[in-house]
């Protein structure tokens, strides 16, 4: 990653918003903004080759986050507004669904929506808005008007590294916590 800078594409407000939303999901962590030329950009990089990765990933090359052609542009860090929140009183949250533990949700999700009002307002009104009409309606009916054979949707977990502008953002941004376990949107729709 130490080489002469390359020409980068123009950055618009949409790209900046995407990158800021991703970085904001990782408060309290050292991050880097990198640029990956389009020739090697992956689905993870929907912002013209710009990506937010952890500083550890840049150093170690873990999880496929960096490649030889990547260029580190800047270091990023967003502090918690109240430092007492950083692993203060809340360090582990466990959720059981019908008596079966699904693990430490604090480590997986930055938000969990379980009230009907929150699910209808945030999940169906915002996070799932990019589903096509048919899939949105099938998922909504399974939640609001389930058949006796449909799995029960208890909650939605929002993933901190989600992106809101992918082709099917719901699979990348939320998991469904159901009576049959934790599922992506695509997995859940395939079960219906």
Image: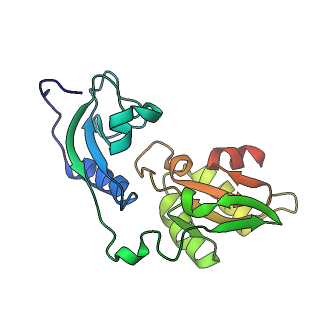
Quadrant holding the N terminus = top left
For the residue pair 179 and 60, the one nearer the viewer reads as 60
Q: How many marks?
A: 0
Give the residue drawn at x 73%, y 43%.
190
Could you say which quadrant of the image residue 151 lies in? bottom right
Residue reaching furthest to the right: 148
> Is 192 displayed left or right of 175 in the figure?
right
> Is 149 displayed left or right of 52 in the figure?
right
Give the residue drawn at x 66%, y 57%.
176
For the residue pair 134 and 99, the one nearer the viewer reads as 99
Give the residue drawn at x 39%, y 57%.
26
Q: Is residue 25 visible?
A: yes
Residue 34 screen position, x and y as percent: 26, 38
Could you say which quadrant of the image residue 94 lies in? bottom right
The image's colour scheme reads rainbow
For the residue pair 124 and 77, the one nearer the viewer reads as 77
> Is 84 displayed left or right of 129 in the figure?
left
Residue 119 screen position, x and y as percent: 59, 70
Residue 30 screen position, x and y as percent: 32, 52
Q: Measured along the vertical axis of the image, is residue 81 above or below residue 49? A: below
Q: Measured along the vertical axis of the image, is residue 18 above or below residue 179? A: above
Residue 51 screen position, x and y as percent: 32, 41
Give the residue drawn at x 51%, y 66%.
125
Q: Is residue 45 visible?
A: no
């Amino acid at each position: 990653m130490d080489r002469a800078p390359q020409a980068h594409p123009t950055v618009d407000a949409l790209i900046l918003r995407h990158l800021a939303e991703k970085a904001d999901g990782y408060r309290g962590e050292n991050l880097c903004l990198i640029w990956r030329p389009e020739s090697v950009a992956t689905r993870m990089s929907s912002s013209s080759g710009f990506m937010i990765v952890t500083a550890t990933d840049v150093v170690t090359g873990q999880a496929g986050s960096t490649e030889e052609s990547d260029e580190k542009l800047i270091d990023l860090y967003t502090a918690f507004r109240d430092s007492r929140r950083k692993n203060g009183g809340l360090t582990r949250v466990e959720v059981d669904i019908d008596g079966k533990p699904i693990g430490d949700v604090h480590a997986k999700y930055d938000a969990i929506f379980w009230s009907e009002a929150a699910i209808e307002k945030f999940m169906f009104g915002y996070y799932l808005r990019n589903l096509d009409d048919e899939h949105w309606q099938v998922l909504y009916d399974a939640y609001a008007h389930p058949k006796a054979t449909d799995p029960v949707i208890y909650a939605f977990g929002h993933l901190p590294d989600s992106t809101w502008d992918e082709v099917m953002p719901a699979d990348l941004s939320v998991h469904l916590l159901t009576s049959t376990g934790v599922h992506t949107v695509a997995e859940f729709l395939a079960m219906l």
